Amino acid sequence: MNSPADSRSNAAKSVLSSDLRIKGDISSDGAVEILGHVEGTVNARALLVGVDGTLNGTVSAETVEVRGTLEGRISCVNLTLRAHARVTADVTYRMAVIESGATVQGRFTRDKT
């Protein structure tokens, strides 16, 4: 019998294509990759916002990687902002990597727990 932890490790990656525009909440036990436009709340194990992707809303994930545009709030353990990232957000994180060229505006709070 599978435990909840087993099902999380087997969760698939969900790719939201560039032609999609979603307004609402997204929840996944796996990874979510945004290549289109999302407005709302995203709860996932991992989130990737692609170069042409846009997210306006609130994110809660273990791992967040931004290559595109994110506006709102981010709560995560590991945050990576790639060179093309454009982020305007209040961020709570444990570990962050910000590549040269990323545009960042907002308040960053390191979670020490």
Image: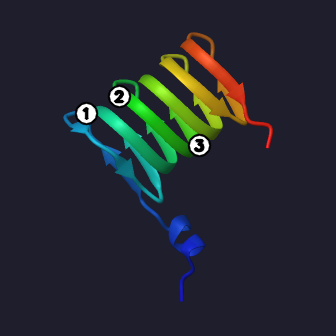
What is the distance, in whole Å, between disc 1 and disc 3 at their CAs? Answer: 21 Å
**Residue 40 x %, y %:** 34, 37
Q: Upstream in the sequence, badge 1 or badge 2?
A: 1
The residue labelled by disc 2 is 53
- Nearer the observer: mark 1 or 3; the answer is 3
**Residue 88 x %, y %:** 49, 17
**Residue 77 x %, y %:** 66, 41
What is the distance, in whole Å, between disc 2 and disc 3 at their CAs? Answer: 17 Å
Q: Looking at the image, do the residues carrying marks 1 and 2 touch, with CB atoms under 8 Å apart?
A: yes
Q: Secondary structure at mark 2?
A: loop
How many other residues sit within 10 Å of disc 3, few (<14), some (14-19) or many (≥20)?
some
Q: Quadrant of residue 36?
A: top left
Establish if 10 lies above or below 49.
below
**Residue 52 x %, y %:** 34, 24
Residue 97 is left or right of residue 74, and the answer is: right
The residue labelled by disc 3 is 63
Q: Secondary structure at mark 3?
A: strand
Q: Tag 1: residue type?
A: Ser
Q: Secondary structure at mark 1?
A: loop
Q: Looking at the image, do the residues carrying marks 2 and 3 touch, with CB atoms under 8 Å apart?
A: no
Q: Upstream in the sequence, badge 1 or badge 3?
A: 1
Q: Looking at the image, do the residues carrying marks 1 and 3 touch, with CB atoms under 8 Å apart?
A: no
The residue labelled by disc 1 is 18
Q: Residue furthest right?
A: 112
